[in-house]
Image (cartoon, helix red, strand yellow):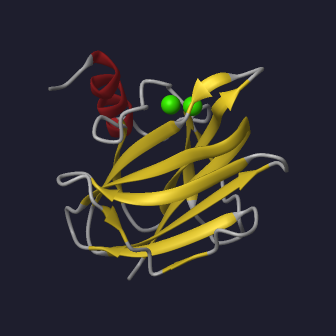
Amino acid sequence: MINRKSAAVALLSMLPLVACSVSDDDDGGGTIFTIVADGDNNDDPMNPQVLGPIEPGRGFRINGAAAFNDGAMGDDEFDSFNVTAVGAQRLRVTLAHGNGFDLDLAFVDSATGRIMPPDNCDAATSPEVCEMTLADAQSINVEAEALEGGGVYTLLIESFAP
Ligand SMILES: [Ca+2]
Ligand SMILES: [Ca+2]
């Protein structure tokens, strides 16, 4: 089912690049990012916030917040974001957050809900970086899960040629 939000995201993705939603290269690698707000309609891993198509050279930067039973922030344990590969590609996800806040990354198959093994993933430090290879048209959910405490994070989802 297409809700109003995902329809708006789909519409935005068809517009030419506009200054307010796209930033230039953030990491020296030449990726053009679309900036996305954590919509907080993304708690169910099987009903993610739909970011849309992604292709090499493009990416999404999510400015988000999450919390696990945190006194100040309450409970926002899961933030799940869906992307669909346009062409075979490598997907790199970088999650940065402050200290005293345990937030983990996962790739979830959007059709089955199964957690996919990343090609590599560093869970011990921030930023946490995971990569995996996507086939053309493969759809995947990138999930940030708060395990302890709460806070803000920056999540980069970047696509590279395979
Ligand atoms: Ca959130
Ligand atoms: Ca959420």
Q: Is residue 101 left or right of residue 30?
A: right
Which residue occupies 37% across, 62% down? Answer: 55
Where residue 122 appears, as percent x and y from the top left, is 64, 74
Q: Quadrant of residue 156?
A: bottom right
Horizontal side, residue 112 vs residue 33: left or right: left
* Rendered location of residue 80, percent (x, y): 43, 42
Q: Nearer the viewer, residue 137 or 47?
A: 47
Q: Residue furthest right?
A: 99
Residue, x 75% and y 62% (percent of image)?
126
Residue at position x 43%, y 31% in the image? 43
Residue 66: x percent and y percent? 63, 35
Instruction: Give the image quarter of residue 134.
Output: bottom left
Q: Residue placed at 61% from the left, 36% from the top?
A: 19
Relative placement, left or right, of 108 versus 148 is: left
- Location of the C terminus by quadrant is bottom left
95 or 51, nearer to the observer: 95
* Figure check: 130 above or below 32: below
Residue 135: x %, y % from top left = 24, 73
* Quadrant assignment, res 5: top left
Depth order, front residue of 34/79: 79
